[in-house]
Amino acid sequence: MYLELFKLHELPFRLSPDPQFLYLSKQHARAKAYMESTIWFTDGFVIITGEIGAGKTTLIETFLRELQADVVVAQINQTQLSPTAFLQTVLVQFGFTPFDMKKPEVLATLNQFLTEQHLAGRKVLLIIDEAQNLSYRVLEEIRMLSGIETTKEKVLRIILAGQPELNDKLNSKDLIQLVQRVRLRFHLSALTAAETAAYIDHRLEVAGSQGRRIFADNAYPIIYKYSGGVPRLVNTLCDTSMMSAFGRDSDSVAAEDVEAAITELQWTEFASRTNRMQVPPIEVAQPSPPEVGPPVGRILLATGGKTLLERELRPGRLVIGRTPDNDLQIDSKFISRHHCQIVTQPHSCVIEDLNSTNGIYVKSKRVRRHNLNDGDVVLVGQHEVMYIDERAPSRGRQSADTGDPSNPREVKEEDDE
C-alpha cells in the first residue's frame, strides 16, 4: 500500500468506525453532548438521526469508550426483529440466555435486572443503532421499557440512532406517546467545505502526517464538490485519490489525482445525486426566535468580585460547563466539561450538580441539588452564580452569605478530557 510513500503508520481513510479518527465538527460535538446527556439525566431518551456515512456509528463507539465503569450498556445493531426477539436480544446484551423464555418471563426478568442495577448504584443504557428498521410494535416495546421506574426516577436510559426515515416513523400518529418521552432529538447534517478540509487533515494527522500537507490546496474544493461533506464519501474519495498519487509515485495528492479517482469511481457532483444532506455553501447566522413571555429569573456570573455576564432564565434547561457545547461556557480549569445545570420551571428554579469534580457550593456547603431562592449565590469552581428571581415582590435584597472566599475546601484542576 501507500503508507511508506506518504510516511504514515496506518491507513487514514478506512471506512470502519474507529473512535481514534473521530473529527468533532460543531454538529458532531453537539450530537455527542446529547448522547452524554442520557447519563446526566435520569429520564434520558435521545434520538440522533443522520444520512448513511454521516458518522453516527463512530460517535456511538467514541461515546461508549468514554463511559464510566458504573454504566451498564446494551448495544443493539440488528433491528429487524419481532417484539419478543428484540426483548430477548436486550437480555442477551445484559448477560442472560432468554431464548426459552416467553414474553411475560422476558419482561419480568428485564424489570428485575433494571431494578437491581439501580439499587446497586449503576446506570443502565440501551443504545440502538439502525433504529429506522424497527417496527412500530418494537418501538412501542421501547416506549414501555422507557417507563420502568422506581418511586423517584426512571431506571433505563435510551439512545436511538438511525437514518432520516426514523424521523418519518416517529412523526406518525401511532407513536405520539413515544415521542413525548423523548428529551432530545438531533439531526446530524453533512460537513461544511471548511470542516471537510479540516476533517481530511485531522485524519491524516492521526495516521502520522505530523503536520505535512499531503493534499494540494486545490484538491479540497473538488473533494467537497463530489462528496458533499459526507464523511464516508470523503473517506472513499480521499483513499482512491491517494492510490492514484501512489500509482505515479508521488508523495502528495494533486487535483489531477482527485479527478482521476472521480473518474474511476464514476461519481457525479454530489448536488446532482441528492440534496438530503447538503449544507448551505455560506453559513448565515439566523436571527433568534423571539422569546415568549417574561423571564422567570436571571443569573449573574462573577469571579474575583467582577461580574462577567448576565443571563435571563426562562422555562427549560441551561447546562454550564467548560466546553463550547454547553449553554453557558466557563473556560476554567476548575470547571468540569459538563459541570451543572439550572432547570427552570414557571414556579421554581433548581441547580443540579452533574457529577463534577469540584461540585457546587451554597453557603460553603457542597450540595447535589438546590432549590434556588432570590439572592442565592452558588459557588461553581472559582466562579459565583447569583440567582435573581424576577417574580420576587421586592427587588431589595441582601447578598446571600457565601462564606469566606478563601474557603479551605480543596479545588482540583479538571482533567476529565
Image: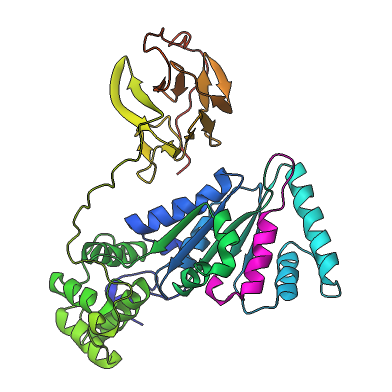
| Residue 99: x %, y % from top left | 82, 75
Q: How is the image coloured?
A: rainbow
| Residue 100: x %, y % from top left | 86, 75
Residue 9 lies in what quarter of the image? bottom left
The residue that appears at 50% across and 54% down in the rendered structure is 35
Q: Is residue 147 visible?
A: yes
Task: Based on the picture, tell me whether residue 142 belongs to the magenta stretch.
Answer: yes
Magenta residues (range): 128-152
The residue that appears at 50% across and 23% down in the rendered structure is 372
| Residue 69: x %, y % from top left | 64, 48
On screen, residue 135 above or below 37 = below
For this view, does 367 lie left or right of residue 19?
A: right
The residue that appears at 47% across and 9% down in the rendered structure is 401
Q: Quadrant of the N terminus?
A: bottom left
For this view, does 251 lie left or right of residue 171?
A: left
Q: Nearer the viewer, residue 368 or 194?
A: 368
Q: Nearer the viewer, residue 174 or 153?
A: 174
On screen, residue 58 above or below 253 = above
The residue that appears at 51% across and 56% down in the rendered structure is 63
For this view, does 110 lie left or right of residue 139?
A: right
Q: Quadrant of the C terminus?
A: top left
| Residue 82: x %, y % from top left | 70, 78
